[in-house]
Image (cartoon, rainbow, N blue to C red):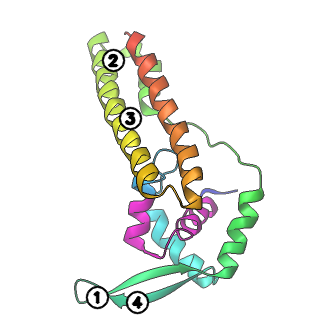
Amino acid sequence: MSKPAKTQYAILGALTVFPMSGYDIKKWIRDVTGPFWAESSGRIYPALKQLMQQKLIVCDATQGRGKRPRKVYKLTARGLALLRKWLILPAHDEVLRNELKLKLFYGKNVAPEIIEQHLARQKERMEKTLVRYQSIMEHIKSHHKNQIDAKYWLLTLHNAIHHCQAELEWLKGAKA
């Protein structure tokens, strides 16, 4: 399956939580599914247009903060059916693209201090990310514990936390 199709499923999934504007969807994907799925605005907005053309979502224009109406997207029954059909299919892992690992792999071409700086920055990022994920987990446990979504959100969040912890453990011993 191509990347644009998966973008559509990320949007359809987000809209099962509640109706959202394009900005809300972008923010949801960045802040909530970010530990395991990212999308750019350049993919989200064209996908929204395509989903509307396919009648998988509908758009309601409501009064926004400015003069322009705020477009709020809602999932249709047809969109939910397509999402459910996709959810049943086996998952295919994406090709990993990790810039830090690529730089480390070819690290002989720069001074070891550069690699040490990369590792230190990664450690700092991972520590901040771990705190953020733990905060999100506590928020879900305290504010969404009775929602059916919560157990699935926590399942993916636990995985993200374990990945962060493993990366931090690896970084403890990583030296150029």
Q: Earlier in the sequence, mark 3 or mark 4?
A: 4
Residue 41 image offset from top left, x and y in percent: 41, 63
The kind of residue tagged 1 is Arg
In this rendered view, identify the residue nearer to me: 45 or 161.
161
Few, some or many C-alpha atoms within 10 Å of disc 1 (few <14, some 14-19, many ≥20)?
Answer: few
Q: Is residue 35 above or below residue 24?
A: above
Which residue is the site of mark 2? 115
Residue 27 versus residue 165 in the image, above or below: below
> In the rendered structure, does residue 69 fall within the stretch colored magenta?
no
Q: Are marks 3 and 4 in contact (CB under 8 Å)?
A: no
Closer mark to the observer between disc 2 and disc 4: 4
Residue 152: x and y in percent read 59, 51
Q: Estimate the spatial distance between the alpha carbons at disc 2 and disc 4, rounded to whole Å.
A: 50 Å
Instruction: Name the one closer to the observer, 22 or 95.
Output: 22
Which amino acid, mark 2? Ile
- The quadrant in which the C terminus is found is top left
Tell which circle, 2 or 3, labels the residue nearer the N-terminal end.
2
Q: Earlier in the sequence, mark 2 or mark 1?
A: 1
Q: Nearer the viewer, residue 140 or 121?
A: 140
Residue type, mark 4 in image? Ala
Residue 79 in view: yes
Q: Does any portion of residue 41 appear in the rendered image?
A: no
